[in-house]
Image (cartoon, rainbow, N blue to C red):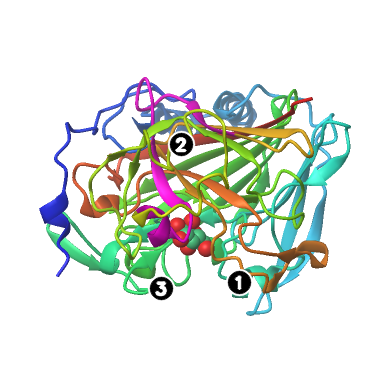
Amino acid sequence: MYRHDAVLGRMASSRTVMFGSQTAHSAISLHPIGASVVRTKKSEETTMARRNATIPAIVAAIFFLDATAMLPYPKAEAKSQMPKQVFGKIQDGQSVDLYTLTNKYGMTAAISNFGGTLVSLKVPDRDGKIGDVVLGYDNPADYESGKAYFGATIGRYGNRIAHGKFTLDGVVYTLPLNNGENTLHGGIRGFNSRVWTTKDVSSSAGEALELTYLSKDGEEGFPGNLSVKVVYTLLADENALRIDYSATTDKDTVLNLTNHSYFNLAGQGNGDILQHQLTLYASQITPVDASLIPTGKLQDVHNTPFDFLQPMAIGARINMNDEQLKFGRGYDHNWVLDKKSPSALSPAARAYDAQSGRVVEVSTTEPGVQFYTGNFLDGTIHGKDGKVYGFRSAFCLETQHFPDSPNHKNFPSTELKPGQTFHSTSIYKFTVQK
Ligand code: GLA
């Protein structure tokens, strides 16, 4: 019988209490999850008291000022023209929508409230020709029945939890198994198949869509009512999509949020990604067993097919005779990012496609990135515009905490407690190389 405990490499603890925050909140970090965990502002209570005690006009003025102060970005004139269209119906008959964010360079990002899904991402190539660089479907029903998690917001726990079990505060929690003997991407109905509440939160920083979802206590086996917020911002002054995640809970819980976009910089459905040049700013991976659960050890990438510290074609070593590559059927592993400080927004990856000239640079506050090369795509999926998605026709860069962290005390913690707010940010920036 395989025992994780036996192979846990007791490395020097990487669980560090982090200070500082990407936001304007008072930055008191309490717990080592994600970029920062901050205490809820006390001032909200006093503000509420003031509101109740004042005449309506002053109440309105205070409310206005307060709302302005709470905006995540500088306030802009109400100039957003974010179009919303009906995307289609899901199985229970609900109609879900598609929102399109645009910037002045003609870049667009289409996002659905079904699964908080990034449905399309259109960026220019080196000749200025706009192309859609993410895989997906033309309708929500295909997202609902699909198993690939194209573009989805993943939660409550991204990637695998071994045997669908973990212990928190002495209580054993059991999750539904949906990936052999393990739980993958939040279980049978993860955040990717929930309908989210939306709000246009555009500002001078760029057009932005906020999505919120309340994951109830016990949903898919996880403890605590978890309020989750995801904000997609298409930056106004560069071709970059920023994703900000935040969450609070009313009971101790675990979480790992990510976005599961499949990129092909040559354009979705346009061949495989084996010639893309990839850099991963990471000197270690968390090697896995045959069911893709981390062994608990950290493995140095030097002199292995996992070394992407210098730009390297994705396909150059993907078929090498290597046990880890065999387990993943290619790359399907978590890289441990080289970070100066655990909470820093720092480079995770860079990919370049010589054909189109497109470059994507990914930065994140998360400690890891799951690099997955579409090894389960086999040409049976017909996606957007009828494109056929073949083997390794896209790659994912899922910024995240490490898989199965609740069962590995030596990994950065994924626990969240009441009174704390989880924050994390990832940015996907597009440029061209001549
Ligand atoms: C993650 C997993 C992969 C695969 C994809 C979805 O990246 O690590 O093994 O399940 O999601 O197909």
Give the CA distance from mark 2 to mark 1.
27 Å
390, 134: nearer the viewer: 390
Residue behind mark 2 = 424
Determine whether, in the image, residue 159 is placed left or right of residue 142.
left
Residue behind mark 1 = 146
> Residue 105: x, y in percent?
84, 30
Circle 3: residue type: Asn
**Quadrant in the rendering for residue 416:** top left
Q: Considering the numbered disc 1 on the image, is that residue within a helix, a strand or a loop?
A: loop
Q: Does the magenta run of residues contain 414?
A: no
Start and end of the magenta stretch? 324-350
Q: Residue at x 69, y 26 (%)?
A: 205
Disc 3, disc 2: CB below 8 Å? no
Q: Residue at x 81, y 58 (%)?
A: 85
Q: Is residue 287 visible?
A: yes
116, 106: nearer the viewer: 106
Q: Is residue 346 above or below residue 222?
A: above
Residue behind mark 3 = 178
Circle 1: residue type: Gly
Marked residue nearer the N-terminal end (2 or 1): 1
Q: Is the residue indicated by label 3 positioned so its CB lies within 8 Å of ligand 1?
A: no
Marked residue nearer the N-terminal end (3 or 2): 3
Q: Quadrant where the N terminus lies?
A: bottom left
Q: Considering the numbered disc 2 on the image, is that residue within a helix, a strand or a loop?
A: strand
